[in-house]
Amino acid sequence: MGVALGRVMNDETASAIRQRLRVTGVVQGVGFRPTVYQLATALDLSGCVGNDSAGVFVELEGPRPAIDDFVLRLVAEPPPLAHIDAIDRRDIEPTGESDFVIVESRRDDNASTLVSPDLEVCADCLSEMNDPANRRYRYPFINCTNCGPRFTITRETPYDRPLTTMASFLMCDTCQAEYDDPADRRFHAQPNACADCGPHIWLEKDALQPFDDVIAASRAAIAAGEIVAVKGIGGFHLACDARNADAVATLRQRKHRTAKPFAVMAADLVTAEQIADLADAERTLLTSPQRPIVLVAESATSGLDAEVAPGNSHLGVMLPYTPLHHLLLEPGDVWVMTSANYASEPIVKDNTEARAKLGELADTLLLHDRAIHVHCDDSVVRVAAGAELPVRRSRGFAPFPVRLPVAVPPTLAVGGELKATFCLADGNNAFMSQHIGDMENIETLDAFTAAVDHMTGLFRIEPERVVADMHPRYLSSRWAEDHYTDRLIRIQHHHAHIGSVMAENGHTGPVIGFSFDGTGYGTDGSIWGGEVLLGDLDGLSRVGHLGVAQLVGGDAAVKRPYRMALSHLWAASIGWDEDIPAVAQTSAEEQRIIRQQLETGLNSVETTSMGRLFDAVASLAGVCHEISYEGQAAIELEALGTPDAEGEYRFDLITNETGLIVDPSPVIAAVAGDVTSGVSAPIISTRFHRALAAAMVASAREMRQRYHIDTAALSGGVFQNVTLLEAAKRGLEESGFEVLTHRLVPPNDGGLALGQIALAGRR
Ligand code: ZN
Ligand code: ZN
Ligand code: FE
């Protein structure tokens, strides 16, 4: 017995077996095959490795313990940018071959693989770029398997050079040798290039003139107060010196952008520390490989022009993420870097388009000839309660999937209207698209269609079902009707928000959901936005809402918060006293019109919108009466808050058998009282935020008593408000609730599509 066992073990260790491994996850374009090659040869294993449409396949031949060791080591130390979802192993017939080889990519139409997002230039490449002895000294397109563009240059999978926008560049012998050498950091680095064979940069100005040193000429243009359009990874930026008031004013004027903050790029972390007061979590985000724009507190001594982010205590800051950025910005430099587009059109990404559209916006174009296949805007994040809170999930994140807690059939969810994204899902993978923009014009719709085509192609997912918002006039909903009437499912807007935060937390329910935003089409045809929902991923229902007010004049009420102030005063039966700033600044004629609309209900819609309540309070407090970008009044109101202020307002909680109403009347009365007696806006702001958090806790307790549910889920654009989010989370947790908040996708409509997928999943 003992002998027999010993011989079996002996056989097992000595004789060669062959196994086929299938590795899925983010495994292409991240240096996976060289890692496999090096590990296999180190362990004396023969076989092969290659990419196909499903991921990476590996065949290994050798003693079983060595193969086990291989798998353990691969899982323990994958390439830095890789993300292994699973390794599937099966025995196959040994072939007796003695080499380990990397084989050509295979195409297979029935499987999907994960494509890596675009990532910042790595430290190794940067030090080479800064080394005068290196052959890529100051070369703006240096990259390797650990860094560089991916998603935005990939036309199709598998991720191989001929299927990227690098296809037109023929590698020189030196680059080719790196590309072919399994021991090299650039082994099969698809965008591999050098100054001899790869893309290059140039400047275009009114009078075409050659620039010997494009970088020096670009810096000189910025120093002279010019606006330079800089082609990047996912599109163009408009750049100018953030300390030059004339340049910033010119940019605002040309872009017709009066108040919406501009993001800035600081040359390095030291420079970022000079303009902003950074917390540790913010430093970590700023220097992460995704390199998002991080919304941070501007320091009092930043020296930046006030018009960079007017009326806003927060500043969007990012660090350089392409080699070109590193060449352009020198320590101490802070440049405005805003997406190059008109208003709500998509970001410009092609040279011809840049020449046609950016000529009036920029004085100089800094172009290159590596084509951008799909546009991808910068991502935006904030820190809330010490954790990452996405505001826009795009470059660096897309198309990395979110894991779904329920497996779904191939599904496309088209999202909402503003901050549009879509989501393509199959099984447990939900691929959120990059930020598309506000779906208000044909250009954005075209970009949406192109992005859907791109992603369905990349992942080979043909949607069996398509999910859209219930709003009959959203362009996304109409697009879905036009293309997929036969397989269309509609999910209510605020349900989708809660589904989104549940899905990313891997939570199937049940929850008490607080879905607070500006606008969403309700099941009763009115405008919802302050909703308390109950249920799980099989279905949610409305059990409570903010007290009803009138949206007088429709869109006009959204653009002019003072209309909401008057409307909420009316709903609370409070007179329009001229001592209230919102009333004082409304002309007698407009007051007459508003009153008429309120009395008759003509040209007026009922709403429970929380965003509009923020507008009303911001106007009542004299903070903001008219807006020029979405959410402006609420953002400015939040920015004023001061933790030192005393007191808080109180909402009335009206309960009945069917649910509850959060009545804002006492809050409106208190704000009107405070403002007329000279209480400052910061104190009003603080008292209001506290009241809303307290109302949420009270509502959640009421619902827990009735339904014995102790998980609360917070979603909707209002929860980009960190003051509210932190106060509500703290209050709910102190009352014993588990609180689900967003970490992976935005609480705003940019995260909506994920919830649409999650809620349609089990229908
Ligand atoms: Zn690199
Ligand atoms: Zn080369
Ligand atoms: Fe929404």
Image (tube, helix red, strand yellow):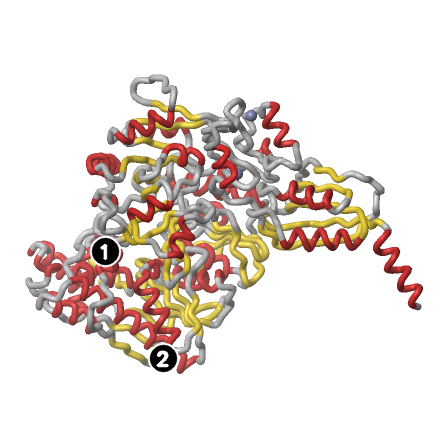
Identify which residue is drawn at 28% across, 27% down: 363
Res 549 quadrant in image: bottom left
Mark 2 or 1: the one toward you:
1
Q: Which residue position is annotated with label 1? A: 636
Q: Is residue 446 above or below residue 604?
A: above
- Residue 759, position as x, y percentages in the image: 49, 62
- Position of 628 with respect to 449 (left or right) is left
Mark positioned earlier in the residue sequence (2 or 1):
1
**For this rendering, which residue is in front, 258 or 543?**
258
Q: Which residue is mark 2?
A: 702
- Front residue of 62/493: it is 62
Q: Is residue 233 above or below residue 13?
A: above
The residue carrying mark 1 has its beta carbon less than 8 Å from ligand 3: no
Q: Quadrant of the N terminus?
A: bottom right
Q: Could you tell me if residue 555 is visible in this image?
A: no
Residue 246 image-quadrant placement: top left
What residue do we see at 78% from left, 38% from top? 99
Q: Residues under labels 2 and 1: Cα distance?
A: 32 Å
